[in-house]
Image: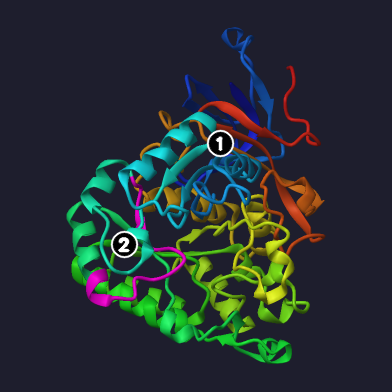
Amino acid sequence: MIIKNGIIVDPSTGLEEVGTLYIRDNRVVRVVPGAYFPGEEEEDENVLDASGRYVMPGLIDLHVHFRDPGQTYKEDISTGAAAAAAGGVTTVCAMPNTNPTVDSVETLRYVQDKAKNSASIRVEQLSAITIGENNEMLVDIPAMKQAGAVAFSEDGKSVMNTLLFREGLRQIAAVDGVVMSHCEDKDLVCGGVMNAGAKQEELGYPGITNAVEDVIAARDIFLAAEQGVQLHLCHCSTRGTVELMRMAKRMGYRVTAEVCPHHFTLTDADIPGDEGNYKMNPPLRSEEDVQALIEGLRDGTMDVISTDHAPHSEEEKSNGFKSPFGIVGLETSAALTFTALVAPGLITVSRMVELMSLNPARVIRKDDERGTLRAGALADITIFDPNVVWTVDPDDFQSKGKNTPYAGKTLVGKVVVTICDGKIVYQDQQQTITGED
């Protein structure tokens, strides 16, 4: 395959210029800057014309929920992978809070086998930290790491038993594992369903304060540093967590952090009423928090943009703020990031790729062949058209979940082709990119 005349964006090599990408046997062979000139040996190649589009390493989402096993009416590995491909994502990290929980080698292998047989993109699976996420007994950490768990997380809740959590961190450090931390002090939630503030008071629901996140973020940063384990903070939403990350990086701790598009594009003031598609955990925060998150993404304090893709059925999300927490995000994340951050000039497109591809690859230690377009890298590639203006229609989603607060929103920039392992796994039917010379 040849991808010609695209704007090659590869922060791993500092490249951002028009060029042509050559793929053979599911690997990047070379990138040639400048205009494309066909050679005789290339006459039979599949040629994609990416003129005016960005050609970037495939996006990597560190935080998705595919609901498989146990709740496949919401999503399954096949539909989740299709949604990822439509969003330009070629690797996902699936959280373990399924039913049953991914807390055993048997369940881990179920996901791995199903992904191998039915997913169009790469699905990495996390292990829980405690059995059943019940905060009582650690999983067999060495066995889960040996079986291929990409990281460990108690996502959906925190390990509230601090002594148990510290022991888990010690064991994960011993196997050189990665911890992805859901920062939520369950004792402080007190039934809250949305950000504590004026909107919460208007709607009459109990609120969730920033301290619910900040307290556990601080705890986990210091405990992870003590145990010498690599820590990644999931779905950060508060100004306090950004400041904690600045402190942690000044102190040289091995910690990274992610921000979700909904947390840097919406505030609690945007909630139109008792609308379940605006209910997520952590909740939409204040304008002050949003600006702190954006600044953290700009200045390098925050490392990754992930989605926390959390599909639910339409019936489940029809009960306002009594609905389950969570929204879908895989099919809108790249466009939201471009619209909110790149188009206004807050970050460059290279920084976008760093946040959505290179840095995630580094977090899960796959940057030797993912998150890059260097020769020899896996041919996982996203082609993104910055000139397409489109309106979000959940009925067009590949995901089973249609629960998004962005329905009807106009976005700038769209994924037009996704290539995984050298194969086209998604192509926008309204955008022409294949063709003959």
Question: Which one is nearer the viewer's eye here, 215 or 302?
Answer: 215
Quarter of the figure with residue 18: top right
Please indicate whether residue 179 sits to the left or right of residue 268 in the image. left
Residue under label 2, please give it.
130
The answer to whether residue 434 is magenta is no
Quarter the C terminus occupies: top right
Does dot 1 land on a helix, a strand or a loop?
strand
Give the color scheme: rainbow, by chain, secondary structure or one colour: rainbow
Residue at (67, 26) in percent of width and height: 48
Crowding near the residue tagged with mark 1, few <14, some 14–19, many ≥20 C-alpha atoms within 10 Å? many
Please indicate whether residue 304 sits to the left or right of residue 334 in the image. left
Crowding near the residue tagged with mark 2, few <14, some 14–19, many ≥20 C-alpha atoms within 10 Å? many
Residue under label 1, please give it.
381
Question: Which one is nearer the viewer's eye here, 421 or 80?
Answer: 80
Q: Where is 136 relative to 121, above or below? A: below
Number of numbered discs: 2
Please indicate whether residue 388 sits to the left or right of residue 28 in the image. right
**Residue numbers of the magenta segment:** 149-165
Does dot 2 land on a helix, a strand or a loop?
loop
Q: Position of residue 249 (x, y in %)?
A: 33, 71
Given the image, on which type of amino acid does mark 1 rest? Ile
The answer to whether residue 164 is magenta is yes
Q: Where is 78 relative to 60, above or below? A: above
Q: Position of residue 173 (x, y in %)?
A: 21, 58
Q: What secondary structure characterizes most of the magenta part?
A: loop
Quarter the N terminus occupies: top right
Given the image, on which type of amino acid does mark 2 rest? Thr
Q: Position of residue 112 (x, y in %)?
A: 42, 38
The first of marks 2 and 1 along the sequence is: 2
Q: Position of residue 406 (x, y in %)?
A: 74, 62
Q: Distance from label 2 to label 1 (Cα)?
A: 36 Å
Q: Where is 344 relative to 273, above or below? A: above
